[in-house]
């Protein structure tokens, strides 16, 4: 494990690719040798087909892309770059800086963050998941996570986003995953599984979908968050008797869900947040993860009812520079 210095700058980090690597460094030329590209051109160049119509939006999009392209792949001359690239030809991850930022975000925050009071569980989830991915031991935060989330759990089940807030599916999702990440009996025993089960039963709708909160909007986020919580906590699949959605034809959390998810597919082939609304890339993720939270019948039924081949077609329409980023919706600026 070592760094390779190039004219006083650290070009390669974490691993020395060795002299036989396609990304070896020529001492005589100080140039990155790319005999075999590890980052294909398709990820760092403009798409081959572009809309010829020029608008203010497309011009702003092009400016954004031109600013981002230099960061996507190492140039032939490393000294001409503003950033360091690793031997894969992509900017190296500033691990220690990211760790410091995430640890700091779990401390005392400036007064301006009062605007994010309804996102307390999300602040924990984002920082903890980032630290865990970077290999940090996050169990040190167990006590603080438990003390933060304890008052956010409501007697009727679920977690609110802040003190005194009603239970919300997204906040409950973030809270449950945060507690699962720090682990330990104290964290896991905090969750009242019985009231959580009954509360999610109140979110279930007769058409197969889920609301985000009691009396709130119904969309695929509710299905995704609910199914993840049910799966992670191993809650009973049978709907509580108190659920207003429970009938002979709708007796479980899975009842009608494949049909609901398939109705969220739009004419474009993409996935919308709810039936008869605009497709969005984020909702394609929610539906995919909802399905894979429970394999077997849900996966098979949804595949039968949804037009799966059209989904990649829609995703291709939201791609701008492939690998750079995708717009959420067709013809939407980054």
Image (tube, rainbow, N blue to C red):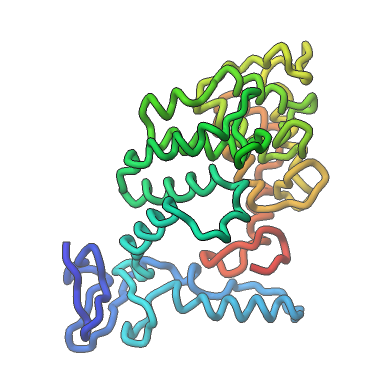
Q: Quadrant of residue 20?
A: bottom left
Furthest residue in direction front, as rendered: 111
> Is residue 86 or residue 166 the one in the foreground?
166
* Horizontal side of residue 169 vs 188, given as left or right: right
Residue drawn at (64%, 40%) of the image:
287
Can the viewer see residue 299?
no
> Is residue 272 or residue 174 the one in the foreground?
174
> Is residue 14 or residue 27 the one in the foreground?
14
* Horizontal side of residue 164 vs 106, given as left or right: right
Query: How many numbered discs?
Result: 0
Return the x and y of residue 93 as percentages of the image width and height. 35, 64
Q: Quadrant of residue 146?
A: top left
Residue drawn at (56%, 57%) of the image:
113
Return the x and y of residue 246 as percentages of the image width and height. 76, 16
Furthest residue in direction right, as rendered: 276
Residue drawn at (68%, 61%) of the image:
317
Is residue 60 positioned above or below 317 on the image?
Answer: below
Quadrant where the image shows the C terminus: bottom right
> Is residue 313 or residue 243 the one in the foreground?
243
Is residue 251 positioned above or below 166 on the image?
Answer: above
Can the viewer see residue 83?
yes
Quadrant where the image shows the N terminus: bottom left
Residue drawn at (34%, 52%) of the image:
134
* Horizontal side of residue 146 vs 279, given as left or right: left
Return the x and y of residue 323 as percentages of the image width and height. 51, 64
* Horizontal side of residue 248 vs 18, given as left or right: right
Is residue 324 positioned above or below 122 on the image?
Answer: below
């Amino acid at each position: 494990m070592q760094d390779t210095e190039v004219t006083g700058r650290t070009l390669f980090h974490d691993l020395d690719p060795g002299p036989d690597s396609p990304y070896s460094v020529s001492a005589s030329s100080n140039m990155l040798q790319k005999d075999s590209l590890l980052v294909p051109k398709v990820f760092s160049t403009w798409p081959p087909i572009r809309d010829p119509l020029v608008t203010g939006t497309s011009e702003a999009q092009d400016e954004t892309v031109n600013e981002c392209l230099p960061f996507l792949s190492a140039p032939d001359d490393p000294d001409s770059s503003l950033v360091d690239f690793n031997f894969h030809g992509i900017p190296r991850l500033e691990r220690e800086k990211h760790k410091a930022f995430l640890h700091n975000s779990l401390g005392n925050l400036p007064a301006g963050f009062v605007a994010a009071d309804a996102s307390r569980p999300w602040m924990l989830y984002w920082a903890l998941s980032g630290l865990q991915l970077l290999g940090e031991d996050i169990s040190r935060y167990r006590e603080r996570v438990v003390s933060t989330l304890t008052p956010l759990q409501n007697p009727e089940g679920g977690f609110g986003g802040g003190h005194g807030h009603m239970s919300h599916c997204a906040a409950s999702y973030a809270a449950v995953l945060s507690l699962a990440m720090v682990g330990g009996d104290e964290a896991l025993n905090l969750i009242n599984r019985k009231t959580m089960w009954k509360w999610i039963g109140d979110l279930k709708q007769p058409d197969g979908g889920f609301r985000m909160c009691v009396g709130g909007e119904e969309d695929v986020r509710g299905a995704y968050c609910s199914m993840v919580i049910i799966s992670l906590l191993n809650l009973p699949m049978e709907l509580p008797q108190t659920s207003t959605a429970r009938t002979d034809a709708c007796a479980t959390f899975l009842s009608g869900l494949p049909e609901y998810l398939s109705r969220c597919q739009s004419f474009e082939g993409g996935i919308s947040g709810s039936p008869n609304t605009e497709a969005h890339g984020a909702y394609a993720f929610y539906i995919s993860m909802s399905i894979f939270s429970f394999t077997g019948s849900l996966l098979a039924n949804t595949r039968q009812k949804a037009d799966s081949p059209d989904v990649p077609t829609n995703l291709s329409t939201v791609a701008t520079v492939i690998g750079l980023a995708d717009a959420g919706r067709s013809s939407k600026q980054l």
